Image: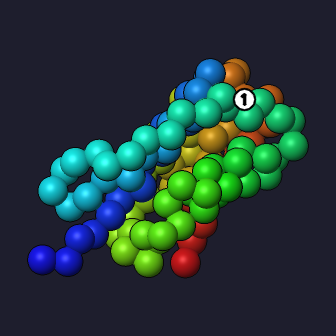
Amino acid sequence: MTHQYYILIDIGATYTRVAIGNNEGRILYKVKKRTIRSSRGPALPEFIINIINKYFKSVLDKVSAISIGSIGPLDIKRGEIIGSPNIKAKQYTIKRAY
């Protein structure tokens, strides 16, 4: 059986947690970093991408999905965090359409 991996992201007010799990439901590794609270819109997505590249680069070609959880309010259809009281920027796009 080929292993498939899943990246799990939790954007919290204090910490952002990024983990990788496998298709057997096991968390293989987790990273916990203080959440970026910049008013510059791209800072948080870049921060998360940097974590993924630093800790999970060796298995990125085997990642089947990425899941993101965040404090709201959220615009699920557009994939955006909007007006969150815990993050300085008014809007973060966390989903990209392909």
Q: Would you say 69 lies left or right of 16 here?
A: left
| Image label count | 1
| Res 32 → quadrant | top right
What residue occupies the far right of the structure in this picture? Answer: 40
Kind of residue at disc 1:
Ile
Q: Please name the residue that numbered disc 1 is placed on.
A: 87
Q: Is residue 83 above or below residue 85?
A: below
| Res 33 → quadrant | top right
Report if residue 84 is visible in the image.
no
- Residue 35: % across, % down: 67, 31
What residue occupies the far left of the structure in this picture? Answer: 1
Q: Secondary structure at mark 1?
A: loop
- Residue 69: % across, % down: 46, 40
Q: Is residue 16 above or below residue 28?
A: above
Which residue corresponds to the image point at 73% horizontal and 54% vertical from the top-left?
A: 46
Q: Nearer the viewer, residue 43 or 77?
A: 43
Which residue corresponds to the image point at 50% horizontal and 40% vertical from the top-left?
A: 31
Which residue corresponds to the image point at 38% horizontal and 64% vertical from the top-left?
A: 65
- Residue 87: % across, % down: 72, 29
Neighbor class of circle 1 (other Cα within 10 Å; few <14, some 14-19, many 20+) is many
Q: Would you say 18 lies left or right of 22 here?
A: right
| Res 63 → quadrant | bottom left
Which residue corresponds to the image point at 12% horizontal and 77% vertical from the top-left?
A: 1
- Residue 52: % across, % down: 56, 56
